[in-house]
Image (cartoon, rainbow, N blue to C red):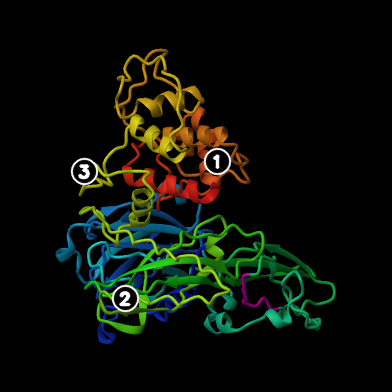
Amino acid sequence: MKFMKKTAAVIMAAALAVSSLPMMVAADDTPTISASSGDATPGETVEVEISISNNPGIASLKLTCDYDSRFFKLIDVDDAGVLGSKSHKPVEEVANGGPYTLMWFNPTKKDDYTVDDVIVTLTFEVASNTPAGDHDIDISYDYSKKDAINTNLRAVYFELEDSVIYVEDIGQGSVDDEDDEDYEDDFEDDYDDNEDEDGEDDDEDTPGEDLSDVKFLNKTYTYDGERKTLKVTGLPEDAEVEYEDNKATDAGTYRAYAVVTLDGESVELSAKLIIKPREITIKGLTAEDKAYDGNTDAILSGGELDGVIEGDDVYVTMPETGKFSSAAVGTNKTVTFTAPTLEGDDADNYTLKLPTLKADITAAGTTTKPSTPSDTETTDPVITPKPWVNPFADVTMNDWYYGAVKFASENGIMNGTSDAIFDPNGDITRSMFVTVLHRIAGKPAAEKGAFTDVESGSWYEAAVNWASANGIVNGTSATTFDPNATITREQMATILYRYANFKKYDLTVGQTRLFADSADIADYAKDAMNWAADKGLITGSGDGTVTPKAYASRAQAATMLQRMVEKFS
């Protein structure tokens, strides 16, 4: 069973902390996520309460709760005390076990979201065969969530206090002592020097005399793409062992089980196989020097991931903007930027360490004189492009779509709905989307089409004629195009797919990605959506859905177009 554990979240949060991202919470008021429960009786129910103390007012939060699904079944979630909208899995989806994810988002109620002791109650049904003793309830959280309101708040590290459910003894025996073993020290240990290619220890295993000698120990590895395996040690010579879930490749924490049998007697053992994410960095990312202009805006360029294992699908959209530590003139000034999110099928196996960037702010109006070439040298003039000046009042550097809007605007792909408004959340129509594709293609000419509702001389006529002539779009009938109809996400992916075919781009799909609502994708759009997801042009939302029937926004369109141009051009 794979999920991000407390220890992984701690390591990742620490990586952020050393990368100059501000922490806005005083040491005495460290925000804390804790869980508590009452005693449980086999065959009955038990409640686990999750509380959030010293909440600094973040606008969104994602928690994951994991438990032993062999003995506990989640039957109810009560989070009425949490303000804002919720986006949880239905309880029915984890009826057969698995981590449970809770997501909250409150973008408008900043004041009354800052409350202590936000309570969420999880109700579990306890199996009648549950052994007595402590059973772990592991809590983790997504440290990368940004505050959509307080732009100074980059990330918040919550202390995590996990809980246990104590099950009363009704004569059925207790959990194995191995389950109570503290594995924090194991997490810090590095076993890499003592592994073979299958992740197994090379130490010679000394056979035991009886079942009291067998051991099934927690182990921790760093992700390297190879399979890791837990093995029981101290086995008597004639003992037999059966394993369950004792092998894993991807980062996460896994509960492994083993049953050892000797002379008709058996013992059940459990252990934790922990594969911690591999740390990677960004190399080649630079911040540009600039002349004093009274603000802290910085322009970034370049950058590529360093340390990804060959063959893994991991990528990021490199940041293009950042912030100087102050707007004052100075040299070697620190430049910070919002941490990009790792994406791709193997992204969960990695954690990103951010580089430290430095740049200069010179006095306004100063220039560096070019050196005078000698009689035997020729020097081409150096032309420095002007930094893009954001004209849109409704687009800020803290918006997730800022880079896409900047890319679309400065390359002449998309204009605003007015000189000062981009309308990122507005719908995009069929005529708008075809027009921006036409611009990317270089505005090629085409003969007039057969659509009676495409006005002669209209701003979109040439684009529609070209797209129709090349099989990129179809009409809503033999004679109509319906230029003002709003486009959906699956329709947008389909048009991009046809455009890629027209441009002879790679249409192969390495692996079909399944979303929670993949069944909602129309048959005509399945190939296109699979391709767009495989190439990273479209991604699902935080709840695992892709919402194919939802209307596409202008910001989403700009983002998909930027990804396509950067990937294929």
Amino acid of disc 3: Ser
- Judged from the image, the secondary structure of the residue bearing numbered disc 3 is loop
Q: Earlier along the polypeptide chain: callout 1 or callout 3?
A: 3
Q: Which mark is residue 418?
A: 3
Report crowding for label 3: few under 14, some 14 to 19, many 20 or more residues within 10 A (C-alpha).
few
220 drawn magenta: yes
Label count reads 3
Q: Separation of disc 3 and disc 2 at Cα?
A: 30 Å
- Judged from the image, the secondary structure of the residue bearing numbered disc 1 is helix
Q: Separation of disc 1 and disc 2 at Cα?
A: 39 Å
Magenta span of residues: 215-223
* Residue at image location 37% in from the left, 48% down from the top: 408
Q: Which mark is residue 324?
A: 2
Q: Earlier along the polypeptide chain: callout 3 or callout 2?
A: 2
Task: Say which of 393 and 32 sits in front.
Answer: 393
Q: Position of residue 539 (x, y in %)?
A: 46, 48
Residue that sits furthest to the left in the current view? 111
Task: Say which of 396 and 158 sits in front.
Answer: 396
